């Protein structure tokens, strides 16, 4: 024991001990740099197809399993959207966000987070205009500018479009050249702003194959989400709009839910 104590006595000298610790930290840091350069990331980046849908989401057969899709419109919002994303992450649920192009500036991080966490992102126009009151050229511009804003944030351009107010006519359908996703369950979170009422309406109207319309711009919607999910998750598998409708790139038409 005496020999061992003498052999490591230098560790008790403060200067040498500090030097030893610094050397250990340097070796550790160099190891991290080496690993970051040479090793592949531990968490794989989600694969996406050319139109931006996640292709590595588990396949769910919504003809056999009771599925339901949560969709959130009008964001991203700097306060509410992160709260909604936190809740979805805690519950391991994937949803669909229909974003307004003019809201993207300054919130690119939130958009990238949506995508990184496996949610689907759709186009909800540039400034929430009623498309049936626009010219064909204006419709094209609304859609294209929103696609560009989303792409510029580093997220694949959407293939889904949700018309503001659900307002669609033949001109809009012909010019959208995207898959139009509507909804069939509206808990009216835009009207009541009361989490209890929103939740009651949601539970009363939920059905297998349904698409739920909500808005990630109202704090009351974020408040309603956790209790709503707690009750719905015992009956339903939550899926994205594309999963629910088994949508593929280039699919045309309007989808209100799975019947
Ligand atoms: Ni909207």
Image (cartoon, rainbow, N blue to C red):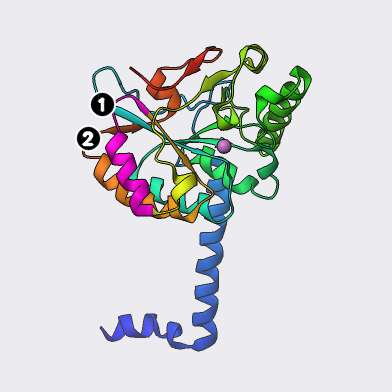
Residue at 61%, 29% in the rendered image:
156
Q: Look at the numbered disc 2 and say if its residue's Cβ is closer than 8 Å to ligand 1.
A: no
In this rendering, would 22 be left or right of 234? right
**Quarter occupied by residue 257:** top left
Which of the image's four quarters has the C terminus? top left
Q: Dots 2 and 1: beta carbons under 8 Å?
A: yes
Q: Residue 66 carries which label?
A: 1
- Measure the C-alpha gap from mark 2 to mark 1: 7 Å
Mark identifier at residue 235: 2
Examine the rendered structure and indicate whether residue 208 appears above or below residue 179: below
Between residues 215 and 167, which one lies in front from this camera angle?
Answer: 167
Is residue 3 shown above or below 168?
A: below
Q: Splitting the image into four quadrants, where does ligand 1 fall?
A: top right
Q: State the image coordinates of residue 131 (x, y, percent, origin top left).
A: 66, 25
Indicate which disc, 2 or 1, sits on the residue closer to the N terminus: 1
Chief secondary structure of the magenta span? helix
Tell me where the magenta segment starts and ends, as one range.
Answer: 195-210
Q: Residue 79: percent from the left, percent from the top?
A: 55, 56
Q: Does the magenta stretch include residue 203?
A: yes
> SS for tag 2?
loop
Nearest the camera: 125 or 61? 125
* Residue visible at 26% across and 33% down in the picture: 236
Q: In this view, does 159 lie above or below 96?
A: above
The image position of residue 162, as x and y in percent, is 56, 27
For label 1, the SS is loop
Image coords of residue 194 (percent x, y): 40, 54
């Amino acid at each position: 024991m005496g020999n061992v104590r003498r052999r490591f006595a230098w560790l008790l000298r403060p200067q040498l001990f500090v030097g030893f610790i610094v050397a250990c930290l340097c070796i550790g840091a160099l190891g991290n740099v080496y690993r970051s350069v040479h090793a592949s990331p531990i968490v794989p980046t989600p694969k996406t197809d050319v139109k931006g849908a996640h292709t590595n989401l588990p396949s769910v057969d919504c003809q056999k399993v009771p599925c339901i899709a949560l969709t959130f419109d009008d964001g991203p919002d700097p306060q509410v959207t992160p709260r909604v994303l936190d809740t979805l992450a805690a519950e391991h649920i994937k949803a669909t966000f229909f974003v307004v192009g003019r809201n993207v500036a300054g919130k690119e991080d939130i958009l990238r987070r949506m995508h990184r966490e496996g949610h689907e992102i759709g186009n909800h126009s540039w400034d929430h205009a009623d498309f049936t009151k626009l010219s064909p050229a204006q419709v094209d511009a609304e859609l294209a500018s929103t696609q560009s804003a989303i792409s510029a944030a580093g997220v694949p351009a959407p293939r889904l479009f949700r018309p503001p107010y659900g307002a669609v006519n033949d001109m809009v359908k012909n010019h959208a050249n995207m898959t139009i996703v509507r909804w069939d369950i509206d808990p009216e979170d835009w009207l009541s702003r009361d989490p209890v009422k929103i939740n009651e309406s949601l539970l009363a109207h939920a059905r297998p194959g349904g698409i739920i319309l909500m808005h990630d711009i109202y704090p009351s919607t974020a408040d309603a989400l956790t209790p709503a999910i707690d009750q719905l998750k015992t009956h339903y598998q939550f899926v994205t709009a594309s999963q629910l409708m088994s949508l593929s790139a280039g699919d045309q038409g309007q989808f209100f839910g799975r019947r």
